[in-house]
Amino acid sequence: MERIEVLKTYKIFIGGQFPRTESGRYYPLKLKNNMTVNVSLSSRKDFRNAVVIARGAFSGWSARAAFNRGQILYRIAEMLEGRKEQFLEELKQLGYTAVNAKKEIELSIDRIVYYAGWCDKYQQLNSSVNPVASSHFNFSVPEPMGVVAIMADESSALLGLVSVIAPCIAGGNTCIVLASESKPTCSITFAEVIATSDVPAGVINILTGNRKELHAHFSSHMDVNVIITCNSEKDVNKTVGENASLNVKRVFVWNKNWNIESEQGPHYITDLQEIKTTWHPIENIGISGIKY
């Protein structure tokens, strides 16, 4: 008897698990081999669930030692390297040529390694001891903002996803990412890499679905601190900006060509940081040894 192939089920990724969308809805995606797969059409409830999980994971992840976050990012790159052939095949099924698929996966791996190296260095570049006209030490240091909602690049299956997730978590934030609607399959396979690496559950959450349906929910949720959109639709970005003002969340439009090396750097990490300034009194010790 001819063996029946076990086909992959594409679910969403929330809290380190792969639930089916709460809405029960799917949309068909036709691949290059003429096979059609059903992709989850995430709902507002899925997003709200992901925000709760991401908020719960934030305190633990932001408290991690910077070098440990770097180790964990490097582990993601290791896992991607080991599954390179699987990603190459999925990218080709999405319409990539063999050459472009190889470039996409290798750039994605290298980009994660790049940000792994920055985890324990960006603080040194962006911290300062400030001169003040009083007997105090005055320190300014970057701290992660919190929960980041990201609408990833629609034109990129993997590199666009990696290029926004890596600097976000490198700086101690947690995130909910809406993957490319037209190229979503690699995002779920990437979620499998995350689930089997050392990333704590809830630090990265990945949804699939319709951006025009979900962008208003992403930008209006009151427990989201930052919203990033990587696309150029003026109507979507206008709504995002208006909704973000409701709780004064930061808005970034990262409509970039992620294939070029210049579109990586510590500024993507520090965009998602806020500066905390601390005052500490200087204790003066006199000749007698008495503090005053």
Image: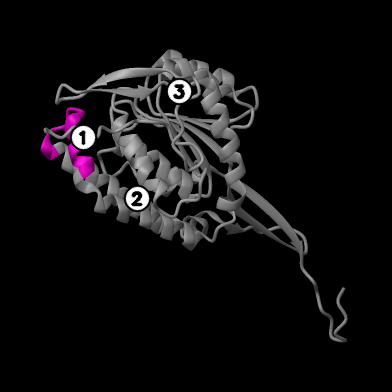
- Determine the residue positioned at 56% across, 56% down: 127
Is residue 78 something that shows in the picture? Answer: yes
Residue type at numbered disc 1: Leu
In this rendering, the answer to whether 280 lies above or below 45 is: below
Nearer-the-camera pick, 276 or 67: 67
Residue 41 in picture, x, y percent from top left? 41, 21
Marks 2 & 1, CB-CB < 8 Å contact: no
Which stretch is magenta?
Answer: 86-99
Q: Is residue 98 found inside the magenta-colored segment of the image? A: yes
Crowd band around label 2 with a 10 angstrom C-alpha radius: few (<14), some (14–19), many (20+): many
Characterize the magenta stretch by its predominant secondary structure: helix
In this rendering, the answer to whether 144 lies above or below 214 is: below
Nearer-the-camera pick, 111 or 8: 8
- Determine the residue positioned at 16% across, 37% down: 100
- The residue pinned by badge 2 equals 112
Residue 72 in picture, x, y percent from top left? 43, 56
Q: Is residue 241 found inside the magenta-colored segment of the image? A: no
Crowd band around label 1 with a 10 angstrom C-alpha radius: few (<14), some (14–19), many (20+): many
Q: Earlier in the sequence, mark 3 or mark 2?
A: 3
Marks 3 & 2, CB-CB < 8 Å contact: no
Crowd band around label 3 with a 10 angstrom C-alpha radius: few (<14), some (14–19), many (20+): many
